[in-house]
Image (cartoon, rainbow, N blue to C red):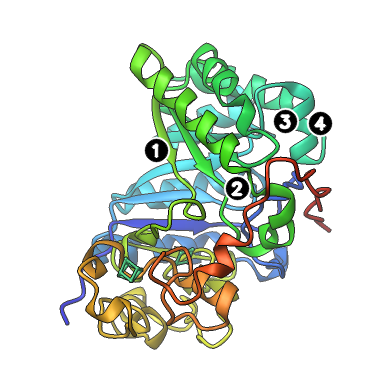
Amino acid sequence: MTVPAPWALLAEVTHRCPLHCPYCSNPLELVREDAELGGDEWARVFIEAADLGVVQAHVSGGEPLLRPDLDAIVAAAHRAGVHTQLVTSGLGLSGPRLARLLDAGLDAVQLSLQDARREGSDLIAGRRSYAAKERAAQVIRSADVPFGLNVVLHRRNLDSVAEIIDLGTRWGADRIELANVQFHGWALRNRAALLPTRDQLTRARAAVADAARRGGGPELTWVMPDHYEGVPKPCMGGWGARSLTVGPDGTALPCPAAYAIADLDFPNVRERPLAWIWTDSPAFNAYRGTGWMNEPCRTCPRRDADFGGCRCQAYALTGDAARTDPACSLSPDHHLIRTLIPAPDTPPEPLTYRPHP
Ligand code: SF4
Ligand code: FES
């Protein structure tokens, strides 16, 4: 099989983070600061990634601004010819800090937001942070840099989606990504607290469509959850097909949530060149293409469109990453998804916050 070149790299430069979001998709066991790749190691990763064909890096975490050498990391990506987007909570993003990052070659900023109003946003983040985000939005808007907002949607904030879009418009965002929560890493502990009701989703989808029809505001991206329609999402655009993640300690993954798949041995950029990792490593080849599929995917006409859905979700729900994603109505495990959706009158469970040392 010819292996296509990746175009995007998720560079998780640290797992450290000032927030405690219950929807965090980082693994249960976080990488410690003393195990993080150094700036020189990241520089080598960007050179190898560019040689492989990567054109874009999302510099993420955790909170990347907690790395004092972030300017040097961004500069290394820039020198390698890779377009960089900083993915940040906004805490610690002052005007001078952003100016230094832009001087280093940063191309875009994506700011996370937890809800439209202070109380809701701080409640989900697990600490006071809304005011810092508001200031960060002003700093980003004042700089000449593309500005995206990213909002993870769930039971506690889906009813505010119209307000979130209004706020993003007032803050001057160019784009708002409205991403319905996925249950990986820490978020799996909060599934019963975060899964929305079907009615909430229907209302939120209508609000987004309404805003898109009115136009004149930021570009809107609505990422539908896959629990409700019996249709799996083409997760990651296919395993090992378009993008890769390098974790804080150099672990390389075909998907940022794949840490949880215990039967795969993920390679590390400290031990292997990225080209070998992408093209030859058993972990990246495990679910590449369609050859690994079992029925019903193996003979399904949609197998080249959705790649059998999400491997991490198949693993989380069935213990076998090679099974059809239970989100698919054709999956023999589809009942595992259907039974999770809460009835409209069920009160939400309490949130379990992500602790950080
Ligand atoms: Fe996709 Fe497999 Fe479901 Fe077919 S059976 S729609 S390939 S997940
Ligand atoms: Fe890992 Fe879908 S989240 S393959």
Figure check: 106 above or below 240: above
Instruction: Identify the element where label 3 is drawn.
Output: helix
Q: Which residue is mark 3?
A: 121
Horizontally, is 60 left or right of 45 in the view? right
Q: Which residue is mark 1?
A: 105
Some atom of ligand 2 lies within 8 Å of the CB belonging to the residue at label 3 = no
First in sequence, mark 2 or 3: give its number. Answer: 2
Q: Nearer the viewer, residue 217 or 213?
A: 213
| Gap in angstroms between the C-alphas marked 4 and 1 | 31 Å
Which disc, if any, is residue 128? Answer: 4
Give the crowd class for mark 1: few <14, some 14-19, many >=20 residues within 10 Å. Answer: many
Horizontally, is 154 left or right of 33 in the view? left
| Gap in angstroms between the C-alphas marked 3 and 1 | 31 Å
| Gap in angstroms between the C-alphas marked 1 and 2 | 16 Å
Instruction: Identify the element where label 2 is drawn.
Output: helix
Q: Nearer the viewer, mark 1 or mark 2?
A: 2
Residue with the most extreme left position: 2
Horizontally, is 152 left or right of 268 in the view? right
Amino acid type assigned to the residue bearing label 1 in the image = Gly
First in sequence, mark 1 or 2: give its number. Answer: 2
Q: Residue at x 26, y 78 (%)?
A: 290
Q: Ligand 1 is found in which quarter of the picture?
A: bottom left
Q: Residue at x 52, y 21 (%)?
A: 165
Q: Residue at x 47, y 63 (%)?
A: 327
Which disc, if any, is residue 64? Answer: 2
- Say whether residue 37 is visible: no
- Say whether residue 221 is visible: yes
| Gap in angstroms between the C-alphas marked 2 and 4 | 19 Å
First in sequence, mark 4 or 1: give its number. Answer: 1
Quarter of the image with the N terminus in it: bottom left
Instruction: Identify the element where label 4 is drawn.
Output: loop
Amino acid type assigned to the residue bearing label 3 in the image = Ser
